Each structure stands twice: as structure tokens, then as C-alpha cells.
């Protein structure tokens, strides 16, 4: 559930003109990859097109990991590749 944060999740609210932080931050997530970690057992890489996506990372993923037995075994990398961010509002 916490890893279901990719862009398609917010397409309908954003297309309908709903620009809340949940919809905009979900629209900022392009891809979520789960791989073997370098420092911990699991690495979750989140590619964003806008830094608003960090809300999804913190509100969904980090909140659900904190205080669980998995917390110490997961490394999370969130980044906006490139030099510019996508404009999320019209």
C-alpha cells in the first residue's frame, strides 16, 4: 500500500481540477523501484519529477515503516533527476 504512490494514482483527481497536496505529490512520483540494497537488505528508489513528491515519501512510506521490524532493513532513496522540475499546476 505505501509503495503505491506512482503518478497514475492521482491522474483522475488532478484531471478533475482537484489540486490538494495528496494529488499533487502523487503526480510528482514517476517511478518506484524495489531492489537489493547496498547498505541494507532492501533499497526503495523513488524517482520524482517535482520535489512535491517528498510528501508522499514521508506521509505514506516513512510513516508506515517507522517503528516496524522492517525499518532497519530498508534504505529509501528519493530524487528528482535533471536540473528542472515538472510544473504540476496549470
Image (cartoon, grey):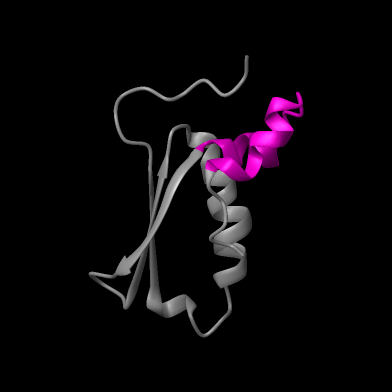
For the magenta stretch, what is the residue range?
7-28
Q: In this rendering, is residue 4 above or below 22?
A: below
Taking the magenta stretch, the answer to whether it contains residue 55 is no
- Report the number of numbered marks: 0
Residue occupying the point 54% across, 41% down: 7
| Direction from residue 74 to residue 2 in the image, left or right | right
Q: Residue furthest left?
A: 38
Q: In this rendering, is residue 24 above or below 9?
A: above
Q: Where is residue 27 drawn, in percent x and y? A: 57, 36
Quadrant including the N terminus: bottom right
Q: Main secondary structure of the magenta part?
A: helix
Q: In this rendering, is residue 18 above or below 42?
A: above
Residue occupying the point 44% across, 33% down: 49
Q: Residue furthest top?
A: 90
Q: In this rendering, is residue 72 above or below 63?
A: below
| Direction from residue 48 to residue 8 in the image, left or right | right
Q: Where is residue 66 drawn, in percent x and y? A: 57, 72
Taking the magenta stretch, the answer to whether it contains residue 11 is yes
Q: Where is residue 29 drawn, in percent x and y? A: 50, 42
| Direction from residue 44 to residue 53 in the image, left or right | right
The picture quadrant where one finds residue 63 is: bottom right
Residue occupying the point 48% across, 80% down: 70
Please name whichever residue, 49 or 12, is drawn nearer the observer in this view of the structure. Answer: 12
Quadrant including the C terminus: top right
Amino acid at each position: 500500500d505505501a509503495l503505491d504512490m506512482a503518478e497514475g494514482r492521482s491522474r483522475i483527481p488532478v484531471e478533475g481540477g482537484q489540486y490538494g497536496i495528496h494529488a499533487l505529490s502523487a503526480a510528482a512520483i514517476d517511478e518506484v523501484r524495489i531492489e537489493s540494497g547496498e547498505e541494507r537488505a532492501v533499497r526503495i528508489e523513488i524517482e520524482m519529477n517535482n520535489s512535491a513528491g517528498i510528501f508522499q515519501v514521508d506521509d505514506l512510506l516513512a510513516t508506515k515503516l517507522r517503528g516496524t521490524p522492517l525499518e532497519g532493513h530498508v534504505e529509501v532513496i528519493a530524487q528528482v533527476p535533471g536540473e528542472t522540475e515538472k510544473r504540476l499546476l496549470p
